[in-house]
Image (cartoon, rainbow, N blue to C red):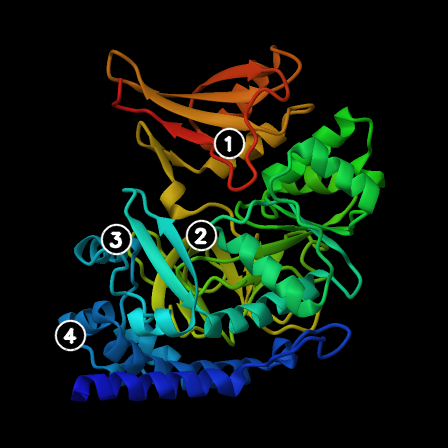
Amino acid sequence: MTAAGTRAEQTRAEWMTVLDKYHEDRERPHSADYWSAKDTWSRERIREVQDEKIAVLAPFLYENSAFYRARFDRLGVAPTDVSSVDSMLANWPVVTKQEMMADALAHPPYGTYSTCGPEQWHDRGWMLFSSSGSTGVPRVFRYTHYDRRHWEQANARALHSGGLRTGDAAFPMVGFGPHVFAWGVQYALAKMGLPVIPGGGLDAKARAGIIDRFTPQVLVCTPSYALYLARTMQDMGLDPAASSIKWIVQGGEPFSGIPGTLERIQGLWGAQTVEFYGCTEVSPHCGGYSCPESQTGDETFIHLMEDIQVWETVDPDTLQPVAEGERGVTVCSSLDSESSPQLRFLVGDYTRLSHEPCACGRNHVRGMGCLTGRADDLINLRGIKFFPVQIEEAVRALPDAGDEFQIRLSTRPDGLDVMTVVAEHTDSAAAAALESEIRSRCEVRCTVEIVAPGTLPKAEMKAKRVFDERGKG
């Protein structure tokens, strides 16, 4: 074996040793309130563990990822210069999706930003996931069974914090394609010993019938599908609020930071929603999750697991850190993976961070207002910038509006870019009111087209609501 191969193996062993040191293999919770005692670690203890992991992670990435090695060398930064949270923030610029996409193009099909190579994949490979960028270039991530075991524990911590307990039967409303949310929840439910009724490959009426007949307590679905399924049940003469469902685990789309959407889902179901937030790139076990206090105050929030990830917020234009409490886009360093540990990856969701302890007893950082719009989703229409969630807020503010909407961007023959919002409502006269709501929230004029409730398509996974056809006419 070459000297480089020996260093790669040595640093991998050192990295996995520190991961093993803090890994738990629980099948039952630590206590009634916490799956893991790590949930109540002090701020000092959290930082100690983060620093210990980063000191080992930097050389592991240098020796096992050509992408990271080239970046270290290009920046003139040595792995020893990134040995703690503070030194990482000072010496390591944010990694963007564009950098990863360029690497994937140059080194197909897997790129070199991952630390799972052919040897690890063939020896203990578990599952491949991919996340496409705005150019359609796939960023592929291979994960091992070693990663899976870490996912299970992080996800069990999240679901237990959200309220799921022994005996709660779950009904996943997803087809098990390459979607990390669905797989992450499934493996956590198995680790927690909770019964599952598979719900893939069924239409909404069949799923409604299963809820009515077999009375599961937990739904697993996207927010948009929760709305659609509730309406389907009502059309069948069933009341979702009178059903057995008491928890709705949701991921894939923002919802808890959008008051109208959160209230609509909980009102329809009479159930508590549970946030399950992750990201394919940064070892996509659950990073953001609910607690018993998440929706009790004036502002919703989620917890972020800091013993396994370092979370920060930066200015979307300069990528420089913003002060605590200021709104910025998320950056995550993944400290819990053999295959995809990352240093300062730009996730890009907007939030405000708070390190104030939570009344639930957890001391990990919180995302205040939850996560409400990814920087990648920003719409720029005639120089006015806004997010799809702002349109969603306007739709939810309209009394008796349907659940779905679409944003259609196009270019007129005279070259002017315009926006049409298609919304569901029983009254066509509601168009004027929605136009006013959008203008007040986004400071942009648009055309509103009203269609009958149930007209727009529904999706099991992430709903597609923005259709940008500008310049294609």
Residue type pointed to by label 4? Asp
Tell me which label, 2 or 3, sits earlier in the chain.
3
Tell me which label, 2 or 4, sits earlier in the chain.
4
User: How busy is the neighbourhood of tag 1: few (under 14 within 10 Å), some, or many (20 plus)?
Assistant: many
Tell me which label, 1 or 4, sits earlier in the chain.
4
Determine contact: label 2, label 1, CB under 8 Å: no
Q: Residue 344, how many percent across, how many down?
A: 35, 67
Please tell me in which quadrant of the rendered image residue 45 appears.
bottom right
Residue type pointed to by label 1? Ile
How much space separates mark 1 and mark 3, taking CA atoms?
29 Å
How much space separates mark 1 and mark 4, taking CA atoms?
44 Å
Residue at 36% x, 45% y: name it: 376
Report the residue marked by disc 4: 73
91 up-or-down from 385: above or below: below
User: How busy is the neighbourhood of tag 3: few (under 14 within 10 Å), some, or many (20 plus)?
Assistant: many
How much space separates mark 2 and mark 3, taking CA atoms?
19 Å
Tell me which label, 1 or 3, sits earlier in the chain.
3
Q: Residue 258, how many percent across, how many down?
A: 59, 42
Tell me which label, 4 or 3, sits earlier in the chain.
4
Residue type pointed to by label 2? Asp
Q: Residue 60, how many percent across, how many down?
A: 31, 80
Please tell me in which quadrant of the rendered image residue 393 appears.
top right
Q: Of residues 180 and 300, which is closer to you in this image?
A: 180
Report the residue marked by disc 2: 349
Residue at 42% x, 83% y: name it: 16
331 up-or-down from 198: above or below: below
